[in-house]
Image: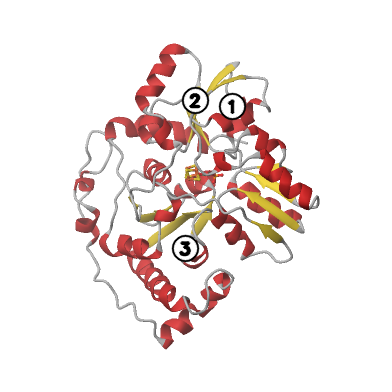
Amino acid sequence: MTTPQRLESGIPAQVSRTAAERFGIIERPDLTFTPAIARETEHLYERVKQFIPAFEWPVYAPYVHAINRIKKERGAVILAHNYQTPDIFHCVADIVGDSLQLARDATKVDSEIIIQCGVHFMAETSKLLNPDKTVLIPDGKAGCSLSESITGADVRLLKERYPGVPVVTYVNTSADVKAETDICCTSSNVLAVVESLESDTVLCIPDEYLAMNVAKQTKKKILTWKGHCEVHERFTAAELLAYKEADPSIEIIGHPECHPDVIAVCDFAGSTSGMINYVKDKRPARVLLVTECSMASNIQAEVTGVDFIKPCNLCPHMKRITLPKILDSLLFMTEEVLVDPAIAGRARLAVERMVNLKQ
Ligand code: 13P
Ligand code: SF4
C-alpha cells in the first residue's frame, strides 16, 4: 500500500477526492417493515416506546435497522449530542454526550468515518481533532444562533480593542472564530478555563449569558459579546417562578446559556450532561428542565419515578438531523465536513488546549 501523499498543511492529499469516491456508495436498501425487522428492532423499540406510538414504529424501524447494519459494514461511528431525538439517541448512536464529552470522545474513536449527529460546529470540532478521518454531518445546514453571531473578523477587532486580553471562545463557534482564540470552552468547563488563565481580565465570547453566569463565579473581569442561544434565551424567570408557585416541590434545573435571572431561580445549572447526571443521581420527584426538550425525553426513557416537566423549546438546527438523512450520509458519504487548512492548525490548538485542560 502506498503512503498517502501529504499537502503542506498536513491534510492528506486524498481528501481532495470526495468521501463518496474514497469509500464508494451503497445502494438504497429496501425500507419495508418486515417481520424480521420487527423482531430485530424490538429491543430498541422498548427504549423509545414512551415517545413513538406503536403504529409509527414501522416507519422508524426500517431506518434504524438499515443504519445499524450499514454503520457496521462501513466501520463508521455515530456521535450524537444530548439534544438529538430519542430515535437517534437511543436507537442508532454509538456515543452520546454534551459538547465537551463529544469533543473528548472524538479524539478516541478508531473508526475511519465519524457521523456527527448534532450541529455543524460539533462536526467541525470532530474534524479539527481528527484531521485524517472522514467526518460527515447528515445535514450541513444544521447551524447554531451562537455560532452565527460572530466571525473571525469580529474577534480580530476585539483583540485590537483589548490588546493582551486572552480570548476564551465557546465551542459553539466556527473554526474561523476558534482560529483567533487562545482556548475554547464548553458550558461544563467554562469556569475552569477562565480560572486557568493568568490574566485578571478575560474575553469570554460569544455567549453573553454564559459569560454573565461565569462572571458571578469568578473574581476576574469578564468581557463578552452579544450572542445568544435562540432556544435558551426564550425562558424567563417569571414563567419558572409560576411553576414553582403552583408546586413548590418542583426542582428546576437549567442550562447556563439562559439569562442569569433564569439561572437565579434554578436549583441547579450545568451542561446538558451535568443536568442528566443531576436527575439520575438525585432522582427528584418532579423536575423542570430549562433546556431543549428532546433531552428531557432522552433522560425520561432511562429513569423511573421522576415526573418531568418539559417546556417544549426545540432547537430547529438540531432537529434538522433525522434518521433518513443519517441513512443517506452512510449510503452516499455526505455531507463531508472539511476545514480550511489555512485556519485548521490554529483552531485545533484552541480546542486541544481545552480538551487537555486538567479539571
Ligand atoms: P452542552 O455543551 O451543554 O451540551 O451544550 C451545547 C449546546 O448547544 C446547548 O445549547
Ligand atoms: Fe445553538 Fe442553542 Fe441550538 Fe445549542 S440549542 S445548538 S446553542 S441554537
Q: Is residue 214 left or right of residue 244?
A: left
Which color scheme is applied? secondary structure
Give the percent coordinates (x, y) of residue 252. Answer: 71, 47
Q: Could you tell me which residue is drawn at 29 percent across and 50 percent down?
A: 336
Q: Residue 53 or 176: which is nearer the viewer?
A: 53
- Identity of the amino acid at label 1? Val
Label 1: how many residues lie within 10 Å, few (<14), some (14-19) or many (20+)? many
Dividing the image into 4 quarters, which one contains the C terminus? top right
Q: Nearer the viewer, mark 3 or mark 2?
A: 2
Does the residue tagged 2 have its C-beta within 8 Å of any atom of ligand 2?
no
Q: Mark 1 = which residue?
A: 194
Q: Looking at the image, is mark 3 or mark 2 earlier in the sequence?
A: 3
In front: label 1 or label 2 = 2
- The residue singled out by tag 2 in the image is 225
Above or below, 149 relative to 305: above
Separation of marks 3 and 2 at Cα, in angstroms = 33 Å
Image location (x, y in percent) of residue 208: 54, 29
Q: Callout 3, which amino acid?
A: Ile
Q: For numbered disc 3, what is the local secondary structure? A: helix
